[in-house]
Image (cartoon, rainbow, N blue to C red):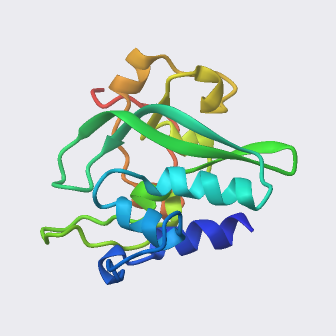
């Protein structure tokens, strides 16, 4: 269920939506609110998971992003999701899963599978939750350690690479 909801939402082309008279409370109405920043893919994902009777939590914290212009940006008001799957919490973020670096306007949406069921050891390089328990790590990192972590693009992890040492941006 989770994969279907996540991929559908992350790959939905918001530029193709019919904006004329969406029924109040409909999925189309909620999707139309995303580009207007009145709603987010994360909140809609959480809502859909709960409708599918999946235990879900909204996690708030800092998101490190370079998808807009290639430079690092910290978004202190970001949120993502944790879903309980087989008695274990797993991490998801449909917002960056739907973006790709570009110079086009409006933002071009393209699916990135890295943010689906992301390993907490990889997730911490881009996401720092306000509550350390949602890092889902054996040894949580502090905010200072997070700020000093190297920025690793999702492509780093998608190729199967890992860091054995030197996790800081400055060695």
- Horizontal arrangement in the rendering, residue 74 relative to residue 82 (left or right): left
Please state which of residues 123 and 14 is positioned toward the viewer in this rendering: 14
Residue at image x 41%, y 25%? 146
Looking at this view, is 142 or 21 the one in front? 21
Residue 25 percent location from the top left of the image:
53, 63
Q: Residue at x 37, y 77 (%)?
A: 21
Residue 104 position (above or below residue 97): below
Figure check: 25 above or below 76: below
- The quarter in which the N terminus is drawn is bottom right
Tell me where residue 50 appears, x and y as whole percent: 72, 53
For the residue pair 152 and 107, the one nearer the viewer reads as: 107
Which residue occupies the extreme right position in the image? 87
* Residue 93 visible within the image: no
Against 151, residue 159 (above or below) is below
Residue at the location (54% across, 60% down)?
160
From the top left corner, tell me how far across and down residue 110 is, in percent: 37, 74
Count of numbered labels shown in the rendering: 0
Residue at 13 percent of width and 69 percent of height: 105
**Residue 168 location, quadrant:** top left
Q: Quadrant of residue 154?
A: bottom left
Instruction: State the quadrant of the C terminus.
Output: top left
Residue 55 located left or right of residue 156: right
Q: Is residue 27 left or right of residue 168?
A: right
On screen, 26 above or below 49?
A: below
Can residue 64 be seen from the camera position used here? yes
Quarter location, residue 138: top right
Q: Is residue 60 left or right of residue 33?
A: right
| x and y percentages locating residue 145 in the rendered image | 42, 20
């Amino acid at each position: 269920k989770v994969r279907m909801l996540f991929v559908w939402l992350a790959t939905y082309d918001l530029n193709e939506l019919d904006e004329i008279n969406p029924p109040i409370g409909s999925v189309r109405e909620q999707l139309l609110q995303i580009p207007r920043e009145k709603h987010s893919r994360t909140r809609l994902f959480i809502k859909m998971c709960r409708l599918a009777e999946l235990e879900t939590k909204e996690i708030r914290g800092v998101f490190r992003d370079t998808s807009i212009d290639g430079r690092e940006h910290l978004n202190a008001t970001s949120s993502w999701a944790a879903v309980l799957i087989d008695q274990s919490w797993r991490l998801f973020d449909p917002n960056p899963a739907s973006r790709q670096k570009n110079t086009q306007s409006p933002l071009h949406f393209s699916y990135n599978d890295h943010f689906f069921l992301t390993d907490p050891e990889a997730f911490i390089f881009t996401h720092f939750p306000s509550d350390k328990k949602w890092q889902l790590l054996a040894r949580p990192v502090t905010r200072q350690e997070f700020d000093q972590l190297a920025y690793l693009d999702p492509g780093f992890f998608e190729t199967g690479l890992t860091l054995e040492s030197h996790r800081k941006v400055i060695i």
